[in-house]
Amino acid sequence: MDTTITIDQLEALATEMTVEVEVQHARLARLCATYGRIIAAREPQTYKLRACHHGDVAGHWDNSYPPRQVYSDHSGPRSIEITTEQTEDVATSGGFYFSWRRVTTAPGLYLGRDGQWYRSSETGSGRLGAFAAHPGNVGVDCEIEYEECHADDLSVAELELAEQVLRDLAFPLIAARRAAQQVRS
């Protein structure tokens, strides 16, 4: 028996796999859009205005501790958070207490009430300072930007995660029952 695989067989397999992924992607995108519409009808307050600035609390603060950090300027898109952006603070000076700049290592993902998808990124700067209680960040001034994207730009893994988050928000009783079953097992 000949076990040789021909190029035609490999191409047929690749085509079949591609079609399966495309069908799964389209199904997940439709499910996410449907869940989004259900949430908008049942619980419109679930869609929150997103912050566009992250930094120190304005005004006087006890200089024994680093200032509290807040998210402000909630003028971003009204949306549901699927994932938040992942950031890293990269040192821009040497020593134990250093200045840094914030870079986004993985963008956040959000779904708007109108079905529009958004990716977020955070950039800015600050410094690690010395305080009597413990070291902490000070002078933080970061901007969060939201960029529209299309469902076609999302991976199947991102859509699978979004589908789970949105399903749990659309049907909270089913989510609670599933969580209770997982605790029992």
Image (tube, rainbow, N blue to C red):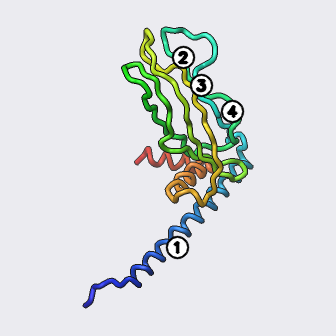
Local SS, label 3: strand
Q: What amino acid is at disc 3?
A: Val
Circle nearer the N terminus (4, 2): 2
The spot of residue 48 in percent (x, y) is 68, 38
Q: Which residue is mark 1?
A: 19
Circle 1: is it few (<14), some (14-19), or many (20+) Cα within 10 Å? Answer: few
The spot of residue 4 in percent (x, y) is 29, 85
Q: Quadrant of residue 78?
A: top right
* Mark 4 to mark 2 CA distance (whole Å): 20 Å
| Tag 3–tag 4 contact (CB < 8 Å) | no
Q: Which residue is mark 4?
A: 74
Circle nearer the N terminus (3, 1): 1
Q: Which residue is mark 3?
A: 70
Left or right of residue 45: residue 154: left
Q: What amino acid is at disc 1?
A: Val
Q: Quadrant of residue 91?
A: top left
| Tag 3–tag 1 contact (CB < 8 Å) | no
| Tag 2–tag 1 contact (CB < 8 Å) | no
Mark carried by residue 180:
none
The spot of residue 159 in percent (x, y) is 55, 56
